[in-house]
């Protein structure tokens, strides 16, 4: 079997969500798996706001050639992993293009602007439709809902990583990611592996 | 944080720039590191502290940047390689010492200062370029252009600093410091270090060997000789290089993260054989010969750098030494308006500058798609303002401040400071804060306001600072207020951590950077010893906190202290389960219907509470709520119910 290749070099992956959801953790896990497989990876994150409810994004540039900058140029995302639906749309607006692939967790997190009545959160079904329209391919993964069933919304991260790996859009397989997961979650590894495998399954069904 | 100490030379690791710098320091055989936390610099000391015991080095969170730099100099004088790290504001705090240190010189151990700038002030109160201080004070300055260089340069800089006997500075920016990339590890040294402060007891020779800045003119002369030596090294440094054609339509001169943006831009525009990039790693003293050699590569030169036109001006100054008949290139950059002189840059901005100069059109994506995507995102994506975390004690404190000021009715003024609580300028803290500058400034400003009684000023003055800020920069201002009898209340938001920068310990926590228990420096004992009235409140007890603030305002007199003590919610949530299960009783909630006008979701604005438009009731979002129970006391209807979890 030949080893899978990057579908493009550099491959531009955006991970987006709301501060506190676990963006940085996902980008770290995926990034480390790539570096161990011999790739050159750059990850840029919006920090500062990361714990405090603001929009958060990680830009990952994966290459065999060179160290790219921590910013994906506008309109140049290849894959968007959206942990929150409007944040996914925010990213599509700036980085999307007709070839972009989206994986989306459709659980809204309301901003204080929405709660306070200064902004409107769009209808969820309509939102998901727009995301689909703007993407070449979309996977909808109810990660938060499934994670809550497992006892904590934090398992959503491992589910989404599973979905990303299971979708086959990255040249990474289970074997490259599992050891990194084990190092990241030494205590709750069993539950996180269950979540990870669930993600793989959801994306395939 | 990554394991920066792994002994695996030749392997590649994914490090943030700060970890790469820390690793470089380890590979250089550093013995001593000191810093005050400040985004984006904190992980340098943070990652060193984590492994300090194991690697037999010393690392500390100092009370402020000036002490950190002075302590590091002390170690250098005893022959230990040492490092101080700080954000741009720290450079301002330490500048007086730096101006003397360059004259006195350093000790036998190489001394390195790392300054992390925050273009666009993503996590800062101000935007500031610290490179000019190197020019101002004669400090050799380098800046890494990627993660590998962040490590390699740091290591190299220690050798240079030691050889020259002068402080050397490495500048980094947020997009190197906090971005991640590949770093190939080198060897870790295996040396025993011995510290000894060598003294010359023969008094006839005393002056030249003492670590003092006098006689200053002579020291200044020595310093210039050191800078000449640095220049010699910089001229042949491999951290400076040119990529591109022998003759280029455009030459980009750049440094730091802009080196990455420039490469991205050239790649996106497919201009590799038309545009050359001169990447500088050693910035000051400017390697003039090296730059001059490359200036004739093109008759158009574009400077791509963030914040100040440091390279632009320095290279233009060289113009004076051009031979009289030389062809002068046209310079583009901040002066010409092609590159912003404020805010951070990115690949798109460089693409735009290059396309404008060369008259190219660039299209990243299908135009129709672009229009549509932008339009639907614009009309459907709501704002997402930053706010305090669910269950944050600051929200509760500012709720009480707001209510106390209202009840007091004398239009009280709140002066603010730097930290998570800076968000109290906005809806997170109910727009209560009126001033914000540098660390500790709010208390200084309060000192002035509190002395205006003779001009008819009768507004209460509340100065809000964090616990870490209290130790860092507030104590002299508090003493001033007590001594000069200024009328203000110092409110210390004591959440037992330097929360904004990553929960570092400070003198009030009883814990050192290396995780060892130490004496707790009690802020209340300290303030009482100065003669101030001190009250300690639990901000979650809204009624009591409001009552105490009201009473202190009414009392007047000199400076007083109110300590709001509650652990940072993120620290608590990492250790324990939420104390309460909280829900809204839909029967009792009257939402928009009457006086409360949904007080909890419209005004109090904890993100754990959401508004269910369909039912017209408030609701707890169980994914976000941390179960602090404070909103229970906010609701006038008693509709929010807490049960022990
Ligand atoms: S929970 Fe209480 S404060 Fe909030 S809207 Fe309902 S009645 Fe008003
Ligand atoms: S109990 Fe209320 S105030 Fe506390 S976190 Fe939950 S929703 Fe926010």
Image (tube, coloured by chain):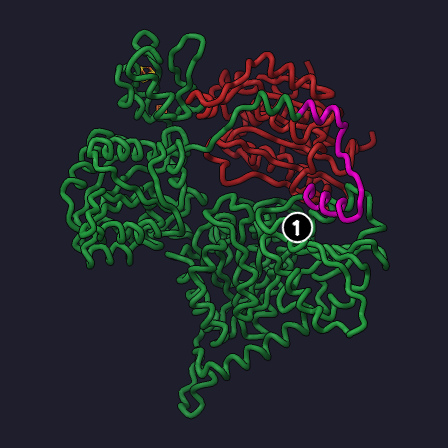
Chain colours: A red, B green
Whether residue B371 appears in magenta in the rendering, the answer is: yes
Is the residue B531 above or below the residue A110 in the image?
below
| The quarter of the displayed image where residue B569 is located | top left
For image coordinates 75% across by 27% down, the residue present is: B367
Chain letter for mark 1 = B
Determine if residue A32 is in view. yes
Is the residue B481 above or below the residue B75 in the image?
above
For image coordinates 34% across by 19% down, the residue present is: B581
Is the residue B298 above or below the residue B199 in the image?
above
Q: Position of residue B477 (x, y in %)?
A: 28, 56
Judge: label 1 CB < 8 Å from ligand 2.
no
The quarter in which the C terminus of chain B is drawn is top left
Q: Position of residue B425 (x, y in %)?
A: 39, 38
Whether residue B46 appears in magenta in the rendering, the answer is: no
* SS of the residue under disc 1: loop
Magenta residues?
B347-373
Looking at the picture, tell me which residue is in the foreground, A85 or B581: A85
Q: Position of residue B224 (x, y in %)?
A: 58, 78
- The residue tagged 1 is B337
Q: Position of residue B334 (x, y in %)?
A: 64, 53
For image coordinates 52% across by 20% down, the residue present is: A108
Is the residue B120 above or below the residue B132 in the image?
above
Determine if residue B510 is in view. no
Q: Is residue B200 left or right of residue A33?
A: left
Quadrant for ligand 1 reads: top left
Q: Is residue A53 left or right of residue B485?
A: right
For image coordinates 75% across by 30% down, the residue present is: B365
Q: Is residue A131 left or right of residue B643?
A: right
| The quarter of the displayed image where residue B485 is located | bottom left
């Amino acid at each position: 079997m030949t080893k899978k290749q990057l579908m493009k070099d550099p491959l531009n992956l955006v991970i987006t969500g709301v501060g506190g959801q676990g963006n940085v953790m996902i980008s770290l896990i995926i990034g480390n798996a790539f570096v161990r497989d011999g790739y050159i990876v750059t990850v840029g994150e919006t920090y500062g706001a990361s714990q405090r409810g603001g929009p958060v994004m990680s830009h990952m540039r994966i290459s065999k050639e060179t160290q790219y900058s921590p910013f994906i140029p506008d309109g140049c995302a290849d894959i968007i992993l959206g942990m929150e639906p409007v944040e996914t749309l925010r990213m599509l607006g700036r980085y999307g293009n007709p070839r972009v692939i989206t994986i989306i967790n459709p659980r809204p997190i309301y901003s204080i602007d929405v709660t306070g009545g200064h902004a409107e959160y769009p209808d969820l079904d309509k939102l998901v439709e727009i995301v689909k329209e703007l993407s070449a391919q979309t996977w909808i993964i109810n990660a938060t809902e499934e994670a809550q069933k497992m006892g904590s919304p934090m398992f959503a991260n491992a589910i989404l990583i599973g979905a990303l790996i299971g979708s086959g859009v990255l040249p990474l397989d289970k074997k490259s990611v599992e050891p990194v997961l084990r190092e990241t979650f030494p205590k709750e590894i069993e539950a996180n592996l269950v979540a990870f495998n669930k993600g793989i399954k959801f994306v395939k069904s | 944080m990554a394991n920066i100490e792994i002994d695996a030379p030749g392997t590649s690791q994914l490090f943030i720039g700060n970890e790469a710098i820390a690793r470089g320091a380890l590979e250089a055989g550093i013995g001593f590191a000191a810093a005050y936390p400040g985004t984006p610099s904190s992980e340098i000391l943070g990652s060193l502290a984590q492994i300090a015991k194991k690697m037999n080095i010393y690392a500390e969170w100092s009370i402020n940047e000036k002490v950190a730099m002075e302590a590091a100099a002390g170690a250098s004088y005893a022959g230990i390689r040492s490092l101080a790290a700080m954000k741009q504001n720290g450079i301002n705090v330490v500048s007086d010492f730096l101006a003397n240190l360059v004259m006195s010189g350093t000790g036998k151990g190489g001394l390195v200062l790392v300054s992390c700038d925050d273009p666009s002030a993503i996590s800062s109160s101000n935007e500031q370029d610290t490179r000019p201080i190197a020019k101002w004070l004669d400090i050799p300055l380098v800046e890494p252009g990627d993660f590998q260089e962040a490590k390699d340069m740091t290591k190299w800089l220690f050798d240079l600093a030691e050889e020259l006997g002068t402080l050397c500075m490495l500048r980094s920016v947020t997009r190197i410091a906090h971005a991640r990339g590949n770093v190939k590890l080198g060897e870790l040294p295996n040396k025993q270090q011995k510290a000894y402060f060598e003294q010359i007891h023969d008094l006839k020779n005393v002056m030249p060997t003492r670590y003092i800045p006098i006689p200053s003119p002579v020291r200044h002369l020595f310093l210039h000789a050191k800078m000449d030596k640095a220049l010699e090294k910089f001229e042949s440094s491999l951290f400076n290089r040119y990529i591109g054609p022998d003759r280029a339509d455009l030459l980009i001169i750049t440094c730091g993260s802009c080196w990455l943006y420039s490469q991205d831009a050239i790649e996106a525009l497919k201009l590799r054989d038309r545009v050359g990039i001169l990447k500088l790693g050693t910035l000051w003293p400017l390697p003039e010969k090296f730059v001059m050699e490359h200036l004739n590569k093109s008759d158009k030169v574009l400077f791509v750098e963030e914040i100040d036109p440091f390279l632009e001006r320095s290279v233009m100054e060289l113009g004076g030494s051009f031979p009289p008949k030389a062809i002068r290139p046209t310079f583009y950059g901040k002066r010409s308006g092609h590159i912003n002189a404020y805010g951070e840059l990115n690949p798109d901005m460089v693409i735009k500058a290059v396309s404008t100069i060369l008259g190219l059109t660039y299209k990243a994506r299908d135009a129709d798609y672009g229009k549509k995507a932008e339009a639907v995102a614009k009309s459907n994506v709501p704002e997402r303002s930053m706010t305090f975390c669910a269950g944050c004690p600051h929200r509760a404190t500012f709720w009480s401040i707001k209510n106390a000021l209202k009840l007091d009715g004398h239009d009280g003024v709140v002066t603010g400071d730097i930290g998570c609580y800076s968000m109290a300028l906005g809806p997170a803290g109910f727009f209560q804060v009126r001033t914000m500058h540098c660390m500790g400034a709010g208390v200084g400003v309060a000192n002035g306001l509190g002395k205006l009684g003779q001009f008819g000023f009768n507004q209460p003055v509340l100065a809000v600072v964090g616990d870490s800020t209290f130790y860092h920069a507030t104590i002299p201002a508090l003493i001033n207020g007590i001594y000069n009898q200024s009328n203000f209340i110092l409110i210390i938001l004591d959440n037992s951590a330097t929360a904004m920068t990553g929960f570092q310990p400070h003198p009030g926590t009883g814990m050192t950077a290396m995780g060892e228990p130490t004496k707790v420096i009690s802020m209340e004992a300290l303030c009482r010893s100065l003669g101030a009235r001190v009250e300690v409140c639990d901000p979650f007890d809204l009624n009591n906190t409001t009552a105490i603030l009201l009473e202190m305002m009414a009392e007047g007199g000199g400076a007083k202290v109110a300590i709001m003590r509650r652990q940072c919610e993120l620290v608590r949530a990492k250790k324990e389960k939420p104390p309460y299960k909280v829900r809204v009783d839909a029967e009792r909630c009257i939402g928009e219907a009457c006086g409360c006008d949904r007080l909890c979701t419209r005004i109090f604005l904890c993100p754990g509470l959401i508004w269910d438009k369909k039912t017209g009731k408030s609701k707890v979002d169980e994914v976000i709520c941390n179960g602090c129970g404070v909103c229970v006391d906010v609701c006038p209807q008693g509709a929010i119910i807490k049960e022990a979890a």
